[in-house]
Each structure stands twice: as structure tokens, then as C-alpha cells.
Amino acid sequence: MAEVMKLKVETGAVTVEVEDERGKVIGSFDFNPADSNILKRYGAVVDFFNTQIAQRENATDEEKLDALNALAADIEGQFDFLLGYKVSDGLFGACGPLTVTKNGDFYFEQVLEKIGGLVEQVTQKRLDKKLAKINKAVAAAPKSK
């Protein structure tokens, strides 16, 4: 039998708990908010939503229920695509993606916006940390004449 080797790497992944407005955890998912591909996937997901919602707004009354169910499934699939694995159960198990929230937004819109905020926050924090290390190394480097 061949020897099995393991390569363990730090990916930067974090666990995000999803809480309702009362602070009750209603789901969770893992992802790397500083993944170099997430911005591309985020843009593709936003484009998908904009296109799909516009197309389905014109459905007849008879088609609306089927269209809404199909849209909910598509939304869940887009979040799985965005984060790179099946996260939709953790995100939408307690609250469907097309649930209308108090402010009139769909639940999935809030989730997408907040994931974007996490990406921005973590990316900036990690970038600031890296720049601080670079600045420290540059300041400590001997000056050439």
C-alpha cells in the first residue's frame, strides 16, 4: 500500500454564525473572505440575481408560484457557488431566501450584502496587517548610500 502524505495549509477560512435579530443562531457556514476569487464570484452572483429577478417579474399569475420556487432554488445554488461549497442549508434552513424582511428586502439580499461586508472587512484587516509588516521591515532595513 502506498504511503499517504498530508499537506496542511492555512486557508484563512473563518466560521460565520448567522443570527436572527434576537441573537439566536439560525445557521453557520465556513468561508475565506479574503479568497482571491470571491470578488469575481460575488460579481457573477449579483449579475445572476439581477437578471433572474427581472426575467421572473413578468410571469403570469399561474406561473408565479413555480417561478418563485425555482428562483429560491437558484438563489440557494448561487450562494453555494459564491462560497465554494453547499452553504445554503446553513444560510436558509431557518429562513427561506425569498422571505421579506422588516425593511422590505428579501432575506437573501441582506445575507449577500453582509457577506460582501465581511469580505471587505477581513480583506482590509489582513492587508493592513501585511502592510504593517512590510513597513516595519523597510524601516529596519539598512540605508544604502
Image (tube, rainbow, N blue to C red):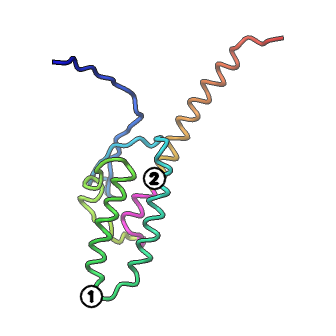
Establish if 75 lies above or below 14. Answer: below
- Looking at the rendering, the stretch of residues picked out in magenta corresponds to 103-113
Q: Position of residue 93 (x, y in %)?
A: 23, 58
Outermost residue, right side: 145
Outermost residue, front side: 1
Prevalent SS, magenta region: helix
Q: Is residue 145 magenta?
A: no
In which quadrant of the rendered image does the N terminus lie? Answer: top left
Question: Tag 2's secondary structure?
Answer: helix
Q: Is residue 110 magenta?
A: yes
In which quadrant of the rendered image does the C terminus lie? Answer: top right
Establish if 128 lies above or below 42. Answer: above
Q: Bin the neighbour count of mark 1 within 10 Å (Cα to Cα): few under 14, some 14-19, many 20 and up.
A: few
Q: Position of residue 102 (x, y in %)?
A: 38, 70
Question: Tag 1's secondary structure?
Answer: helix
Of residues 20 and 37, the one nearer the viewer is: 37
Outermost residue, left side: 1
Q: Is residue 53 left or right of residue 123?
A: left
Q: Bin the neighbour count of mark 2 within 10 Å (Cα to Cα): few under 14, some 14-19, many 20 and up.
A: some
Q: Which residue is mark 2?
A: 41
In primary-sequence order, the first of circles 2 and 1 is 2
Q: Position of residue 29 (x, y in %)?
A: 31, 46
Of residues 6 and 14, the one nearer the viewer is: 6
Establish if 139 lies above or below 121. Answer: above
Measured Cα–Cα span from mark 2 to mark 1: 33 Å
Q: Position of residue 27 (x, y in %)?
A: 27, 51
Of residues 144 and 6, the one nearer the viewer is: 6
Occupied quadrant, residue 20: bottom left
Q: Which residue occupies 36% across, 65% down?
A: 107
| Mark seen at residue 62 | 1
